[in-house]
Image: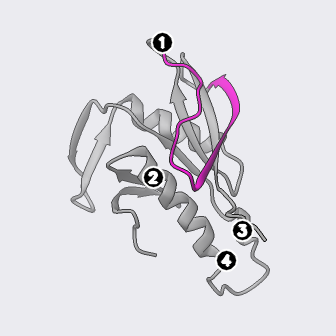
Amino acid sequence: LMLNPPGYECQEDAGCWMLAFDRMAHAVTFGLNLKSAMSNIDLLGNVDYENMFKVGILSGPFTAMGPHKTTGMADYFGPIVNRAARVASNCEPGQVCVGIALVDGVTADPPDFGPTINVSLLEIKKLKGITIDVAIFQCTKRRIETLR
């Protein structure tokens, strides 16, 4: 699967990947495209294609960046990395979730990723090891219905 929209793999650890995109909407689109693409892959055995992975997305500033020791790609450091991992661990298998940190007057309004993506608030909570509230949103592809 090509990264579409463009992004890149920063690192992999025990079957979990950290990818970087230039904007949150691109990460959401990638996650939803990955979910759709899985149904077109022929795997052996009884595979639950809808629930074989989960995607957690968070946007924000990083503290430092440097080349990853294995891939050479940019690797990110700071609270944003831990927070993104916590959003991912909060997702159920099959979900594409976005976390919005509720600091500095940020409200739990759903982000707008365009007319083809539904966004619904799942919950507001403090994630493990994080002292601020985070709004967790689930993203799904909007069904295009035709008028007859």
Q: Nearer the viewer, mark 3 or mark 2?
A: 3
Here the colouring is: one colour
Sequence-earlier tag: 4 or 1: 4
Sequence-earlier tag: 3 or 1: 1
Q: Which of marks 4 and 1 is in front?
A: 1
Q: How far apart are marks 4 and 2 (CA)?
A: 19 Å
What type is the residue that disc 2 sits on? Ala
Q: In this view, does 37 lie to the left or right of 65?
A: right
The residue indicated by pointer 2 is 27
The kind of secondary structure element at disc 2 is helix
Q: Can residue 16 be seen in this view?
A: no
Sequence-earlier tag: 1 or 2: 2
The residue indicated by pointer 3 is 146
The kind of secondary structure element at disc 3 is loop
Count of numbered tags: 4
What type is the residue that disc 1 sits on? Gly
Residue 71 rendering spot, x and y as whole percentages? 27, 62
Q: What stretch is highlighted in magenta?
A: 105-126
The kind of secondary structure element at disc 1 is loop
Q: Which residue is drawn at 70% across and 55% down?
A: 93
Q: How far apart are marks 3 and 1 (CA)?
A: 40 Å
Q: Which residue is drawn at 50% across and 46% down?
A: 113
The residue indicated by pointer 1 is 105
Identify the image quadrant of the C terminus.
Answer: bottom right
